[in-house]
């Protein structure tokens, strides 16, 4: 049994809308047709199993209701789909239980807020190949967050220019570096040339210090064959990670890649916000992330505390909880990646609100590379912020004898604290 | 140069938001970083090239604005991205020009309303393999719409039960039959068994009458390898068409399939509505359909007049125009598929509002199979409705000496006319 929870909003009857979803998404059509017997229906019919009324809405989420609409009723509705009717194919699940629902007339809002899959899904999908343990093993980082940074500007650097910046970042002691998600393989920076310019620096540093910085190359491509060529290029050059724009390549691209992958797959979810930003429409992250975890995301970007984007802190905290909660086994948890406007100042609140864990990749762009003392000082400052967070020492106190953190507070502290 | 038009909604400055999109989606970061020079920026920077103010909104599309928000400004903003900065990869285009925009703080709504791609995109993608001419050639239908129907109920029939219905539909003279998009390969109806039960009927009918009914089998699968096995199964059994749930498989799945396909690819866009239903958020179909046409959709479902869904007629008319307008050449136009609640009664308005063309697949579910005289009478009625539409004869008049149409008017006419 697959159970989906829909948050229904309608000026009509919530019960009628729930019944319509169940009917349309399994056996429904607009008039009775020959051959449609009760026995057939019962075999595969979705069933409404619970309706939990919510406070009415004041404004319709979809502005379709006439201006003299009466009460806008809301409820969370659980609908059960027999596993036999859907199977374990995620694209079938998406099509049957979700795809068509947003087209149904008579609702003024609809959001998928929960999804409970049976264990058969756990068995049918590979899940993360590396996840938290693989990311820790490959970076050699234990007992604290993996600290990462991003090569900026997002676009425009030629491979040798990128490599020059990367060389400096490697020297900073950072654990992880990534291409901006918008950098894949444009004419001015073909992936092949970028790999050729960067990987020798990573390997040389490893030879000298024993520390192999994890570098995530942008390998996304619409054509899965081409994406695999990108993957192979990174892997054969000694790389161990890739940025994957999961929404752009889609579930097919992700499934294809994961089956053949030897790289840690770092998921960027750009495009996701359009599916979640309106609270009455679309998806909760808790639902949507299940698809990508089953497909094999190893590291999942979920924003952070005090980000530069629209997403409120509470939503990040919920997302962190979602990706850290096993679906079927702890092995299906990806490594949460906190990023966007991070510089260390958000470490205490991140730590406090995510269950006092250091099992995350903490991604700082400008917070590291724009530190007044340079990137190495930036990395130290971030590590110090996390030490303070774990020890429950206020950053300002810890900064008294940690000058790099003190400089960060001075430079970035106006933004958050 | 790639030009994207964004419909921006903000309580702040439209100009500032436009500049932020251009900056964030190309070279932006939150603080200046070493190495970021003006020369680099200029090479790949997106540029705001036009701002056309619109009437203010009264209600914010995303309910983030405080209740004492002032004027909600709106404008259509054209932003140009240098082709060299993006390249021709559609997933790069989606990520760079669209993916991240919906996360930007300070807007209360954002919709991508136009997209102008340079000819390099036309050269980089295969487009439809069959489209209109291929669909006409394979069905042998000229001078009128291709008439199609759908096996219902959506789910629950075993292969032999489906074949029984299909046998009756083939005998009705219909040109095209499809699996419901929600039917792929569940345990109770594995695709292999469905193909084995149905294709002999199609081929036998072809042998007897010379008419080969186009049957679209649901081959979608998350795993592109598995989807190709489904494709091959249909092709080797003599089939010539497949239903593809494009949103569920994603651009990667679609690109992979098209490269290897010998089947007409009939796209079902379930899931699309969540991206377009709120008029202030998401995408116009005009934009989104370009991705799928370049990737190779042959037949594109776009609803119809008087549908059972939320979508207004005007939106269908716009969609019809979009898919019928060449991007780079007439060969990149898919066959428009009008469906949902169709029974022939909508033929006159469909014909009148789509440029008086019969170049479409007109898909009727219950409108054919629930005709009181049986499916053959249903098909006749639909053909008669189109004859009347093309001849500018009111349906009621034409029905006077066309009893099948008369019966349809009596049975379904309360719904629309």
Image: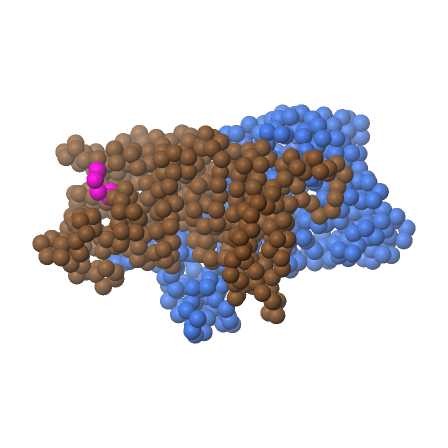
Chain colours: A brown, B blue
State whether residue A4 appears in this view.
yes
Q: Residue furthest left?
A: A401
For the point 45% across and 40% down, which residue is it? A291
Asked whether residue B24 is in view, the answer is no
**Residue A145 among magenta residues:** yes
Q: Quadrant of the C terminus of chain A?
A: bottom left
Q: Position of residue A389 (x, y in %)?
A: 20, 51
- In this picture, is B21 found above or below A120? below
Magenta part of the protein: which range? A142-146
Q: Examine the image and state in which quarter residue A186 appears.
A: top left
Q: Is residue A54 left or right of residue A337?
A: right
**On the rendered structure, is A226 left or right of B238?**
left
Tell me which residue sits at (32%, 56%) in the image.
A307
Q: Is residue A203 above or below residue A411?
A: above
Whole-percent x, y for residue A296 in the image = 40, 36
Magenta stretch: dominant secondary structure: loop
**Above or below, comparing residue B334 to residue B20 in the picture:** above
Q: Position of residue A33 (x, y in %)?
A: 75, 41
- The residue at the far right in this view is B401
Foreground residue, B74 or A39?
A: A39
Magenta-drawn stretch contains B164 = no
Residue at the spot 52% in from the left edge and 33% down from the top edge: A88
């Amino acid at each position: 049994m697959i159970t989906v929870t829909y948050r229904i909003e309608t000026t009509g009857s919530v019960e009628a809308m729930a019944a319509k979803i169940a009917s349309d998404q399994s056996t429904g059509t607009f008039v009775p047709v020959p051959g449609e017997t009760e026995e057939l229906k019962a075999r595969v019919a979705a069933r409404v199993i619970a309706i939990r009324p919510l406070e009415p809405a004041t404004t319709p989420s979809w502005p379709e209701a006439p201006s003299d609409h009466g009460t806008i009723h809301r409820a969370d509705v659980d609908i059960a789909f027999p596993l036999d009717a859907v199977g374990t194919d995620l694209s079938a699940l998406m099509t049957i239980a979700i795809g068509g629902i947003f087209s149904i007339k008579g609702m003024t809002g609809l959001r998928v807020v929960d999804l409970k899959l049976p264990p058969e899904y756990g068995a049918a999908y590979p899940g993360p190949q590396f996840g938290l343990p693989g990311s820790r093993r490959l970076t050699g980082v234990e007992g604290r967050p993996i600290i990462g940074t991003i090569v900026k500007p997002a676009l425009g650097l030629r491979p040798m220019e990128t490599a020059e910046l990367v060389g400096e970042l490697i020297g900073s002691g950072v654990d992880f570096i990534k291409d901006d998600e918008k950098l894949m393989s444009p004419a001015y920076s073909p992936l092949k040339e970028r790999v050729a310019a960067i990987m020798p620096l990573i390997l040389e540093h490893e030879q000298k210090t024993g520390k192999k910085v994890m570098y995530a190359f942008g390998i996304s491509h619409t054509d899965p064959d081409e994406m695999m060529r990108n993957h192979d290029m990174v892997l054969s050059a000694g790389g161990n990670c890739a940025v994957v724009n999961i929404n752009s390549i889609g579930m097919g691209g992700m499934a294809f890649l994961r089956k053949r992958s030897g790289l840690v797959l770092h998921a960027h979810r750009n495009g996701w916000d359009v599916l979640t930003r309106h609270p009455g429409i679309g998806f909760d992250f808790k639902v949507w992330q299940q698809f990508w975890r089953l497909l094999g995301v190893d590291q999942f970007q979920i924003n952070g505390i005090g980000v530069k984007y629209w997403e409120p802190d509470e939503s990040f905290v919920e997302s962190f909880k979602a990706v850290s909660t096993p679906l079927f086994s702890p092995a299906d948890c990806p490594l949460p990646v906190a990023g966007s406007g991070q510089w260390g100042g958000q470490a205490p609140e991140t730590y406090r609100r995510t269950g006092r864990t250091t099992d995350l990749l903490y991604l700082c762009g400008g917070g590291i590379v724009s530190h007044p003392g340079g990137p190495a000082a930036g990395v130290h400052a971030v590590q110090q912020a996390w030490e303070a967070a774990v020890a429950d020492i206020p950053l300002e106190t810890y900064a008294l004898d940690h000058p790099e953190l003190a400089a960060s507070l001075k430079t970035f502290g106006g933004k958050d604290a």
